[in-house]
Amino acid sequence: MRTLTAKAETTRQHILDTGRGLVLSKGFAGLGLQEILSTSGVPKGSFYHYFPSKEAFGCALLEQYVEQYRQRLDTLAEEKGTGLERLMRYWNLWLDQPGHCGIAGQCLVVKLAAEVADLSEDMRRILNAGVARLQARIAVLITEGRSDGSLPPGTDPQALAQVLHQMWLGAALLAKLGQDRTPLQHALAATLPLLTCPAPTPSSRRTTGRT
């Protein structure tokens, strides 16, 4: 993207901020360009100065969202505490967000994942790459927790990170559907046992196929 003046960057950011609220409320396909323009107070020509198309606007919106999310997780990961403490701090943030359904009311992944998978290949790639980076960062925290002794040895950190994140995304979707935090609370209750379950030892494995 070309370099923008401070004033132009402020206008571009205003369009993105306004658009994010509208997308969270209405989705992407159901949001018309005219509503973005009227709500943000910019003419169509100004919009196309920053975004060649509505899809380009969606790509920019998702790129910014996943980058801001990554920065938030990096900041949390760099705070003091064991790996386990930092992980649980992260999951608790999903519940600490305002509203009836916690993070689900503000999460573009929850709002758009299924929609953009069929709507825009570019937007799908951006969102999928962002989720993959997030899961990789969670896996690093799991590894750090095992190194500092706050977590026992267990299954592959990347696989565990994917399972945990998928569980929380499903809980967030149900929380949004029911306008109720209970699914997130259930996910939180299940997270610690999953993190602290030690890897099975050879002696603990049962031989199958025999009675």
Image (spheres, helix red, strand yellow):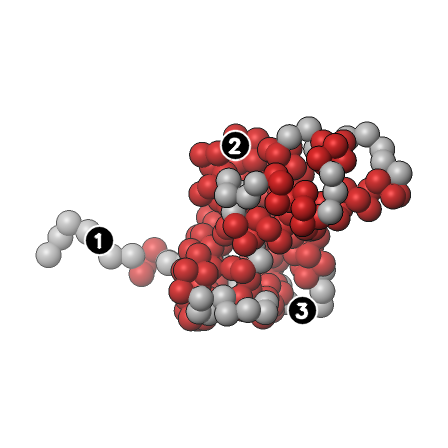
The answer to whether mark 1 and mark 2 are in CB contact below 8 A is no
Quadrant in which the C terminus appears: bottom left
Location of mark 3 (residue): 81
Residue tagged by mark 2? 120
Percent across and percent down for residue 51 are 70, 33
Q: Position of residue 11 (x, y in %)?
A: 79, 44
What's the CA distance linking mark 3 and mark 1? Answer: 40 Å
- For the point 57% across and 31% down, the residue is 122
Within 10 Å of disc 2 (Cα), the crowding (few <14, some 14-19, many 20+) is: few
Note whether 115 is above or below 160 in the view shown. Answer: above
SS class, disc 3: loop
Badge 2 marks a residue whose secondary structure is loop
Residue identifier under label 1: 207
Q: Position of residue 42 (x, y in %)?
A: 74, 42
> Within 10 angstroms of label 3, few (less than 14), some, or many (20 or more) residues?
some
Q: Is 170 on the left or on the right of 107, as rendered?
A: left
- Return the x and y of residue 64 as percentages of the image width and height: 68, 44
Q: Quadrant of the N terminus?
A: top right
